[in-house]
Image (spheres, rainbow, N blue to C red):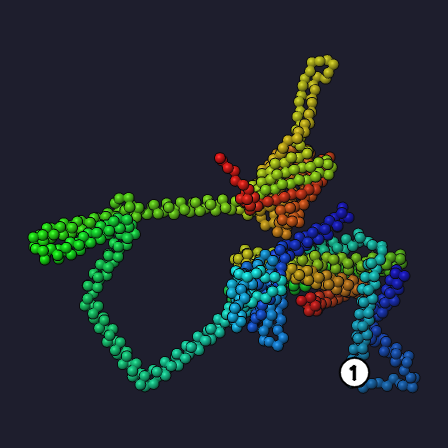
Amino acid sequence: MKKFLTPFKVGLVVIGSVVAFILMYNIVDTSLDDNKGTYTTYAIFDDVTGLVARGEVQMAGIKIGEVESIELLQGKAQVKVVMRIEGRVKLKEGEPPTDKSVNYWKDGATVSKKQASPIVGTSFLDITPGVKGRDMKDGDEIKNVDKSGGFDSLFKKFEKITSDISQVTDSLAKTFGSEEGQRSLQKILERLEEIANTIGRFINENEQRFTSIVTNAEGITGDVKVLTSDAREDMRTILSDAQAITREVRYIVGQSGADVQEGLGSLKGTLQRLSTTLDSLNYSLQNVSEITDKINEGDGSLGQLINDPTLADSTEKLVDDVGSFVNRIVRLKTIVELRSEYYGRQSALKNTIGLRLQPTDDKYYLVEFIDDPRGRTRLTQSTATSTDPGKPVVVREENVQTTDDFKFSIQIAKRWGFFTGRFGIIESSGGVGGNLNFFEDEVELRFDMFDFGEAVNPRLRISTAYSPLEYVFVVGGVDDIFNSETFDFFLGAMLRFNDEDLITILSSAPAPSFN
Amino acid sequence: MGSGEGVDTTSTKQPSSGKGASNPAADPEQLAAGDGPPSAPDKPLSPFLASSKAAIEAVGSWTISGVEHIGQFSLMVFETLLMALRPPYRIGILFQSMEDVGVGALFIVLLTGLFTGMVMSLQGVLAFAIFNAEALVGGSTAVALIRELGPVLTGLMVSGRSGSSMATTLGTMRVSEQIDAMEVMAVNSLQYLVAPRIVATVMMMPLLTVLFDFVGMAGAYFVAVKVMGVDGGIFLDKIKGFVEPMDIIKGAIKGGVFGMSISTLSCYRGYFAAGGAKGVGEATTSAVVMSSISILVLNYFLDLVLW
């Protein structure tokens, strides 16, 4: 026992420390995302105070690279800063300047030095990618260097502002500091006081009128607002009517000017027409007043619409609901898995097609259809009594039947960090399982325990999947570890697509026509 | 040649180390009696000269014994490393030593790590709160733990727990003449007793260091995030800004070097212990003191080399 325990305990310490190392390594690992490789660019700065090698290079607040080296250019007070940038980030060179004296490449990538925080004093580089020109390659120079950014320049500006302020105060002191200045200041203050007094008196005397003016103005603007915003269509008709009427009045007045010369006979008729016209104008304006009154009181559909707050509330709620529903649909990820495994002892292929519905990052539903060479084993027992003297009285028959059925799995899974727990039906029998994901899900360790009733021990399967390429996994593992007769090992491959791939496939596939 | 040399080394060196205490007094007298001309009578020296002479003699003998210790130590380490590479390989004994160092010290190392991380975090939050920069506590604790405190405190704990046990075991075997008996049976005692302990300590120290770091960081996270209310995401993110992956490996390398110094010094002290039970006690004390000092001094020089 002792002999067994010693290596076991030592092994536990070794495994524990390796796991601890991997976890800590993942936490502190800041290496660049070099799926698509990295490339270097450089820029020439006048001042790199606070910038260090291995410092961050950011774009819009996201780390996209590191400062690789900082070196002083020979014979110049300038510094060459070499940056290593992730391959997925494309920088544009911009268009070369037409004027040789200007060293600015239009619409090209720009780099500026920014201070991370005023206390710690470290700086980082911020790059904007640019929009025109060719993509930058390894070893290219970022021509546009922004020299204004950061706290350094801010402090310089402060310095300038304070010197400006001191100049102003100096001249003020010169103006008002002298005796003459003080006297004139005194005079100005006296005049100011006088003016203020006059204004105060004026306002006091006319307070009543000011109040009524302000109230009137308020009322007018309120009415106009209601009219213009709510009864726009009515207003337009009414105003066009009024316009027509005034045009007519003008015409009549113009005509009546001629009538005077011709004789006073037609003047009466003309004035009568004018009176009728003015009456109808009066009537129109009365209508406007009535409509606005009704709207204010909440009569009619327009009034109700404007005055009823519940409508606005329900509209808002409806928009919210639609928003959250759309969000939920957008969030739902669909992942399709196709898995083929070759079982060594049975020399047979096992194929699985699976569908993952993932509403949030830490939860998914897994539906799988499995074509298992082991099939499905059913054990039936039957007991028969017989009266035939040649046979035993009771015959018990055990029948083990293996059918080549499809099996299915339906599981609900929840993820905590690198561990995912699964629960549900596994290969047509209740079971539990789990996944351990490492290295950004490139390596997946998976275990399933199910079939608790079929054999003495439950069926435990442990498999590892490694993804050497995107979408493609190499799978290997052992099946039914506890049952030595049915124990098996397997090796295979898995394809895993997510819904973005599906969207690409579906959108590029020809649409069915219904002609 | 191997086993014969081993016997030879120990048998020639043991008397000299055993005589260490009486050497300063005995040797000069012998020299004076043997080599001095017979015409020089025993003229009493003036008190000043006598005390100066004693002081100079003390310095001399101290120097001689120091150099002697260094030589003996170097020879033992060299021979042990040589022996460790030669068959027979006793895997069982190696595992036994690994259990003794690794598993035996595990609990105390984890406990120290947990509370070190927790207290660093607690004080860090309080101190950084002055600048309103509590978020930095994750990074600063991680740097302190992974680069310095992890290896050093693990080393101190292992030297107290396992180094002392090595010195006592070997010392007892030496004074009860078990080591001599082993040599008589033509078993190389360095290969059988010392080599597995050194190899096991060098192998287990990096692992214990990593575990210390991990448990310390977990304790720091718990105190900062769950007790003091620092944002968990920022706590972890700031660690990235301060610590590089290579730091963990360098910390583990430091642990390995400390393991080497702890095991060699402790085994040296125990292996050459003399003077009965008292000698074993002295050897143990001196083993722990020397390995602790060596850890602190080595730590500085390793920092210079590694960072």
Q: Is residue A99 above or below residue B56?
A: above
- The residue drawn where x is 62% and y is 45% is A435
A445 relative position to A258: left or right = right
- The residue drawn where x is 61% and y is 61% is A137
Find residue A503 and report its horizontal and vertical position in percent. Answer: 54, 45
- The residue drawn where x is 30% and y is 52% is A229
Find residue A405 and report its horizontal and vertical position in percent. Answer: 64, 31
Q: Quadrant of residue B179?
A: bottom right
The chain identifier of the residue carrying mark 1 reads B
Q: Is residue B113 above or below residue A417?
A: below
Residue sitting nearer the eye, A63 or A44: A44
Find residue A128 and report its horizontal and vertical position in percent. Answer: 53, 62
Q: Secondary structure at mark 1?
A: helix
Find residue A283 and report its horizontal and vertical position in percent. Answer: 18, 49
**Which residue is tagged 1?**
B52
Residue sitting nearer the eye, B241 or A423: B241
Q: Is residue A5 above or below residue B1?
A: above
Whether residue B262 is visible, yes or no, is no
Residue sitting nearer the eye, A245 or B206: A245
